[in-house]
Amino acid sequence: HRALWKLFRRSPREPRNFLFRQDDGGSRGPRRVRFYVLSEQPPSTDGDGLWRLGKPKLFAPKLREGDRLRFNLRASPTVKRKSGVEEKQGKRCDVVMDARKRHAAGERPFDPLHAAQEEGERWLLRQATSAGFEIARGLVDVVCDDGVVEQVERSALRVDGYRQHRLQRKGEAPIQFSTVDFEGVLIVRDPMRFVEKVTLGFGPQKAFGCGLMLLRRA
């Protein structure tokens, strides 16, 4: 984030006006890392040899209600919980750890990956409600207990890649957050609201590469 900040010649006192997403790209080799950046302004420097910059493209999608888009999103899903009567705003909690706290004793063992799928999907559906889109649904084959294959309508959404991050800071408490990867197909319901939300980003921890939704036509 600091390197990208310098690339745009931003003062530490100025607010962040860009989103980014790191793509490790295994096919390009372990030392070839690509960053996708959505910014209000183009880079103001060549990066002093650290970066190989692609040609900037204008982000001005022409969308209509009902358009279907494939999307890929790395986000930090959280939910606000109050820890006391006096607390008004509530504290952000990782949705998986929040589910662990609510997991009743005596039930089947807690599965963080399963929780990430369920709670992550709920979080994204809440985001969709206010961001002018919905998750597309489609028919998938499901094998029943008797071996019969039936087609069931389900959300065209994949949720995986749950990871916990701990970033050390000299003389300060470490920064801790989690990330989840979302991939699927969405349907645009309010083009203006949707583009505005994509520009602002989804969820917290945008300074650490979260919140940028990558899009292409379905």
Image (tube, grey):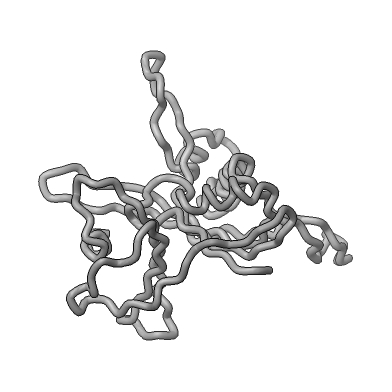
Q: Which residue is drawn at 89% across and 65% down?
A: 148
Which of the 4 image quadrants contains residue 159?
bottom right
Check the picture and name the quadrant holding the C terminus.
bottom right
Judging depth in this view, the residue of 14 and 26 nearest the camera is 14
Which of the 4 image quadrants contains residue 18?
bottom left
Q: Where residue 123 sits: x, y (%)?
A: 56, 44
143 w.r.t. 30: above or below: above
109 w.r.t. 71: above or below: above
Horizontally, is 153 left or right of 39 in the view? Answer: right
Say if residue 211 shows up in the picture: yes
Judging depth in this view, the residue of 30 and 3 nearest the camera is 3
Horizontally, is 201 left or right of 175 in the view? Answer: right
Say if residue 118 shows up in the picture: no
Check the picture and name the quadrant holding the N terminus.
bottom left
Q: Where residue 121 sits: x, y (%)?
A: 60, 49
Judging depth in this view, the residue of 47 and 91 nearest the camera is 47
Q: Which residue is drawn at 81% across and 62% down?
A: 139
Judging depth in this view, the residue of 120 and 193 nearest the camera is 193
Q: Which residue is drawn at 41% across and 55% down?
A: 210
How many numbered discs, if any? 0
